[in-house]
Image (cartoon, grey):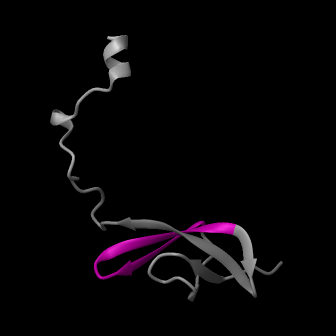
Amino acid sequence: METNTKAYLAGGPRDGSSQDTDGKALLEIEIDGMIHRYIRTTKTHEDGVVYNYDGMVAPGGGEPGVEDPAARVASPKADEQG
């Protein structure tokens, strides 16, 4: 049984390029200090598997966003339910 080790990247900063991979479901590529994630699909392209872009994350994990949870206003539905 032969395993495809070529990933064709769809979307994101590396759209249309290919890269050798070990066949994992998640492919992470570091670009300019950030991690860009691609997820394996069931689609194939030529002699490899298509990986869709899933977004960018910081290498150290989550970072604070612009929203302040303490200043968040409850939704009208939440107010009705008490």
Q: Is residue 36 left or right of residue 49?
A: left
User: Residue at left 33%, top 22%?
Assistant: 76
Q: Residue at x 30, y 59 (%)?
A: 61
Q: Nearer the viewer, residue 9 or 20?
A: 9
- The reply to whether the magenta stretch includes residue 60 is no
Question: Horizontal and vertical percent for residue 68?
Answer: 18, 42
Q: Residue furthest right?
A: 1
Q: Quadrant of residue 25?
A: bottom right
For the C terminus, the quadrant is: top left
Residue lying at the far front in this picture: please name it.
76
Report the residue at 75% width, 87% height from top. Answer: 47
The one nearer the camera, 42 or 16, is 16
Q: Residue 55 location in percent, x, y?
A: 43, 66
Query: Which SS does the magenta portion mostly show?
Result: strand
- Report the side of 72 relative to 20 (left or right): left
Number of numbered markers: 0
Residue at position x 74%, y 77% in the image: 44
Q: Quadrant of residue 74?
A: top left
- The N terminus - image quarter: bottom right
Spot occupied by residue 13 in the image (x, y as percentages of width and height): 44, 81
Magenta highlight on residue 33: yes
Which span of residues is magenta-colored?
25-41
Residue closest to the eye, 54 or 73: 73
Q: Is residue 13 left or right of residue 18?
A: left
Left or right of residue 25, residue 72 in this image = left
Give the quarter of the image for residue 57.
bottom left
Above or below — where is 53 with respect to 8?
A: above
